[in-house]
Amino acid sequence: MYKIMIIEDDISIAESLKIYIEKYNYEVFIIKQFENIIDEFNKYEPDLILLDVNLPVYDGFFWCREIRNISNLPIIFISARTGDLEQVYAMDNGADDYIIKPFSLDIVIAKINANIRRAYGDYSHMNKERILSLKDVTLHCESLTLKNINEEVRLTKKEVELLSLFIENYPKVISREELLRALWDDEMFVEENTLNVNITRIRKRLTEVDARFFIESVRGIGYRLVEVQ
């Protein structure tokens, strides 16, 4: 039985989610003390988190970053904030998905099921570390790290998914549509700016480890990984 942790300060919403999610054979725990969520996280050891943005003490973006420092589990934001920037910021801080309030409970359970399958089910590589190498650069997909000789930097799950595509297809051009599908399954639900932000972050990560590669834009098509000459 997979364990779901709900971090939501509106108790009526949290309880409604709990009752509905438990119908699908999940164990659910609601956070009620918001001062140190990491302690609660370590005690409960959830398999997936539903996380609100507006919380007491620190907001959901802060706690998402803190959790990402110690775990790769799926994190789904549930928020009344509808702006593109909020959704990009959530993904940029390590979120796997974003649901806007008011929401359908059926959508919530569908997102939970999809993320559980992706992380632990048929599509999971959790039992064996997937490592991709290109010259001196090594991408550790499950530990979310990029290494080059003595340099190492942590990535978000989305950055790993993008960079793995570039390494696996090097030196081919990857279309924007293919990159969007790899990240969110259906490009219709992804803003163009979201992909741009993630590409910018990967470029920065490659620079931080002194990689001999950079991501080049191919006008009207997409991007490709290029070796510095």
Image: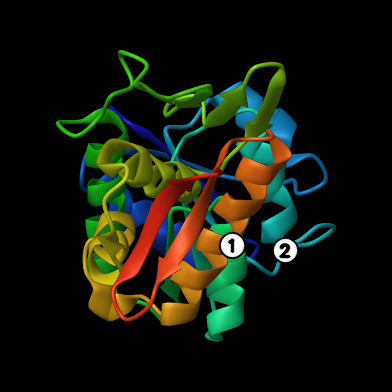
Q: Check the image and report above or below for 190 versus 118.
A: below
Kind of residue sitting beneath label 1 = Thr
In front of the other: 43 or 16: 43
In front of the other: 188 or 165: 165
Q: Can residue 154 be seen in this view?
A: yes
Say which mark, if any, is on residue 211. Answer: none
Can you give x and y, in whole percent of width and height, for residue 220 in the image?
Answer: 31, 81
Q: In which quarter of the image is residue 117?
A: top left
Q: In which quarter of the image is residue 207?
A: top right
Can you give x and y, in whole percent of width and height, for residue 147 in the image?
Answer: 59, 24
Say which mark, if any, is on residue 55. Answer: 2
Kind of residue sitting beneath label 2 = Leu
Q: Check the image and report above or below for 34 versus 80.
A: above
Q: Check the image and report above or below for 168 versus 216.
A: above
Q: Check the image and report above or below for 180 versus 132.
A: below
- Furthest toward the top, the residue is 128
- Furthest toward the bottom, the residue is 83
Can you give x and y, in whole percent of width and height, for residue 226 in the image?
Answer: 45, 48
In the picture, measured across the screen, residue 189 lies left or right of residue 75, that is: left
Label 1: how many residues lie within 10 Å, few (<14), some (14-19) or many (20+)? Answer: few
Dot 1 falls on a residue whose secondary structure is helix
